[in-house]
Amino acid sequence: MIFKKVTKVFIQQVCVCSIVMLCCLCCATTNRFTQGKVVPSGFYGKTTFTTVKSLIILPCELNGERKNFLFDTGAQVTGIHRDSIFGEIVTVRGGSNRTIENGSEIVASLKIGGVDFINTFATNDNMTELHEKIPNFGGVLGRTVMDKSNWLINYPGKTIEISNEDLSDETYTDIPLLESSSTPYTYIDIDNKRYKAIIDLGSTSVLNVPENTELAKFLIERYQFSENRRERYTVGGTQNITELVGSVPLLKIDSAEFKNIEVNINQSSQIRLGMAFFTDYMIYIDNKNHRYRIKRIE
């Protein structure tokens, strides 16, 4: 059942999984994204995680009930799996530009590693296909929760630490983020040209490039690509897509160099560095200083 519709809010939802990202919001709704707090105010927690197709599946307690959440930095809003939607209706747009209507709610308690995120804003939807693929699925953990903490992800070791204090040191390499946006955007450099990209840990890609863009046309002309067909989950369910796959020999982020990077070119909303780009790294999400830091694990 869909409860009373108060207003419509437009949110963009990125491809691959049920991932919510801000597209256009009124001020009142934007304020909801920052509401809530962490208990205690000085906190540290640590937990293990599992993976599905390289994506992080994080154990949480949703209002006292243990659930598994998909960890997604591309999601501005946490999404809760419900049998039916309720609350204020929001329109969600996917990376493939399909839209659906979700409900919304305030999550009283979401505990991670013993740290309690209380009264945070979330959307809700029946994410049937993700529920079938992820055991005890609770939803998608987005930045309405993430932005309230620093996160140290040891991907090879399958652990996550969260704290209000700094968890990194000078052995990490900085990935500069755009100061003008709370979304984790950075610039990548390919063949001495810069392109804006989102760091989207809810994507299974290494580097995903939207078709019919300047970068896609350049890559197709310069490097060898082959056709690939696969299923992709996005807003509205599973799609069968045809894409081009290949690699670029060198990609730079600031002064850091990354070699032989896999690329897939398909219908998507923006250039993204996905979770598969970082699987050999410690990833530090420093929300206090608005930066990402990485350290390769040999």
Image (cartoon, rainbow, N blue to C red):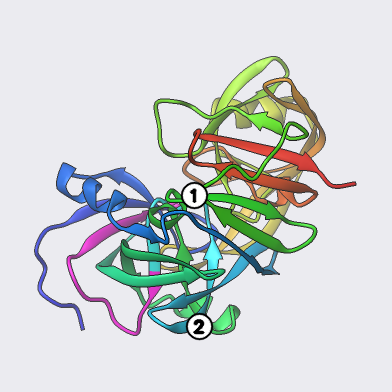
Tell me the quadrant of the picture where the N terminus can be found: bottom left
Q: Taking 134 as reference, is 170 above or below it?
A: above
Task: Give x and y (percent) for residue 233.
Answer: 53, 65
Residue at 41%, 55% in the rendered image: 41
Magenta stretch bounds: 80-98
Give whichever of discs 2 and 1 has the lower sequence position: 2
Q: Chief secondary structure of the magenta span?
A: loop
Quadrant of the image occupied by residue 191: top right
The amino acid at mark 2 is Arg
Q: In the rendered view, does 60 fall on the left or right side of 235?
A: right
Residue at 20%, 50% in the rendered image: 29
Q: Which residue position is annotated with label 2?
A: 66
- Cα–Cα gap, marks 2 and 1: 23 Å
Task: Give x and y (percent) for residue 210.
Answer: 55, 39
Magenta stretch holds residue 283? no
Q: In the rendered view, does 266 fall on the left or right side of 251?
A: left
Q: Taking 227 as reference, is 273 above or below it?
A: above
In this view, the residue in front, 19 or 145, is: 145
Residue at 71%, 36% in the rendered image: 169
In this view, the residue in front, 78 or 97, is: 78
Q: Taking 199 as reference, is 49 above or below it?
A: below
Q: Which residue position is annotated with label 1?
A: 74
